[in-house]
Image: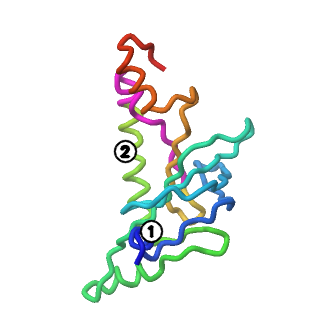
Amino acid sequence: MDDKKKVLGDREPLIPGSAILLKYGEQNIGFNIKSFLGAGGTSLVYNAQKLSPNGTVAGTLKEFWPTMLGGSSYNFEELLAAQQVHREADGTLCLPHDLCNKQFERIRENVAVLRKMKDQNAGLRFFIPYMELYAGQDGVPYVFTPENSSGITLAAYAKEAGNNPNLPAV
């Protein structure tokens, strides 16, 4: 078994070039999937573009789809929930609603804490990315992190700051 299959398990990433529609409150926002970047224990990660009236915004889109949803012969309820997980032909990911609701709330709380830290601490604001929380049509949480509007990556800024301690903030 190759490394990609080990990391993905039974999860199927969105196909590059596909488009998905996510909810931000009552608004529907379109995203184009540019490429699959990788997978972790809780999410699949894509290079994506958010479509807006002002043009497109490039960034990273995390799709909540954990590798382990529970489910064993000892817990029949969790086993049934895990067996319900699938991706529709249009790309919609379908997970158990209680799992989506719990994770959406957990992520919402984390994003709120990070935004507060970013707003209150001038030093940390350059290291905490701006994140936007969306929900898929079936309630699955997604987090979009737009690229730095200045075009300067954290790695490039840190390297330059190491060479020039008086570098102005971006």
Q: Which residue: 41% across, 42% down?
A: 111
Circle on res. 4? 1
Side of 120 where 151 appears, left or right: right
Side of 168 where 94 appears, left or right: right
The range drawn in magenta is: 117-134
Where is residue 126 drawn, in percent x and y? 42, 27
Which of the two labelled residues, at mark 2 and mark 1, occupies the earlier sequence position?
Answer: 1
Q: Which residue: 40% across, 58% down?
A: 103
Q: Residue furthest bottom?
A: 73
Where residue 53 sits, quadrant-wise, is top right
Q: Nearer the viewer, residue 10 or 82?
A: 10
Where is residue 6 drawn, in percent x and y? 39, 72
Q: Amino acid at mark 2?
A: Asn
Q: Which residue is mark 2?
A: 110
| Circle 2 or circle 1, nearest the eye | 1
Q: Nearer the viewer, residue 132 or 59?
A: 59
* Disc 2 element: helix
> Is 123 part of what is drawn in magenta?
yes
Position of residue 170 relative to residue 7, above or below, is: above
Q: Which residue: 36% across, 63% down?
A: 41
Count of numbered circles on the image: 2
Q: Which residue: 54% across, 67% down?
A: 13
